[in-house]
Image: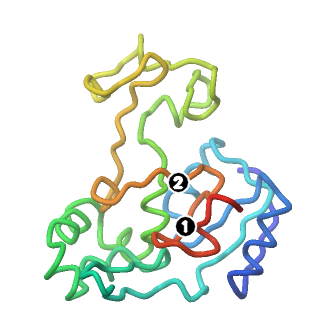
Amino acid sequence: MINFDYQRATNVAEAIRLIGGDPKARFIAGGTNLVDLMKSDVEKPSRLIDISRLPLNTIEATAGGGLRIGALVPNSDVAYHPLVAERYPLVASAILAGASAQLRNMASTGGNLLQRTRCPYFYDTATPCNKREPGSGCSALEGLNRGHAILGASTSCIAAYCPRGNSPSLKKRIPPEFSDVVPITASPIGSPAR
């Protein structure tokens, strides 16, 4: 693992300021995916900005009958929340079926939405991978690919998205520069127009 700077943001504005000047900086909260990627040398952030103590950890009912789930809500809290169980039982079931209790307690909802593919070639920095390095190629196309996509794949990547927890139910298109945590609802940190 590489050396990196560490800073804890005390508010949302500070988190935006800290990440704004450093394209290699990454947010970290639970770190259950980002730390693995750093250990494998897939991610090499220059700085980790800890946002785990920001006020993005609530689950609230919305006027339209939905739920606003903060990016820092642990997956275990989402799974056992009464409103989630009542209104979105499949989300609760997916979280409980998708990870161990230890991971559910650490993993943040925002980080879970952003976790990277589980393709073994993505984690193997000695092989080409378009998800890791665009334009380098996809080793899974001609390599061992039994667990990869057969429908909806492209000629540039066949990695199946096989995350833990709630990601299949809630996955959104969020720019990769919002590394580990992005609020699910519109907020300053989650704004793609950073």
Callout count? 2
Q: Nearer the viewer, residue 83 or 31?
A: 83
Q: Identity of the amino acid at label 2?
A: Ile
Q: Earlier in the sequence, mark 1 or mark 2?
A: 2
Residue 156 % position (x, y): 49, 20
Q: Can you tell which mark lies on residue 76?
A: none
- Quarter of the figure that contains the C terminus: bottom right
Q: Is residue 111 above or below residue 17?
A: above
Asked where in the image residue 188 lies, by quadrant, the reply is bottom right
Asked where in the image residue 93 lies, by quadrant, the reply is bottom left
Residue tagged 1: 182
Image position of 155 (left or right of 31): left
Image position of 44 (left or right of 111): right
The residue that appears at 58% across and 49% down in the rendered structure is 37
Contact check, label 1 and label 2, Cβ < 8 Å:
yes
Q: Nearer the viewer, residue 63 or 155?
A: 63
The residue that appears at 37% across and 86% down in the rendered structure is 59
The residue that appears at 30% across and 62% down in the rendered structure is 166
Residue 96 % position (x, y): 22, 68
Q: Is residue 157 above or below residue 163?
A: above
Q: Identity of the amino acid at label 1?
A: Val
Residue tagged 2: 174
Residue 45 % position (x, y): 74, 53
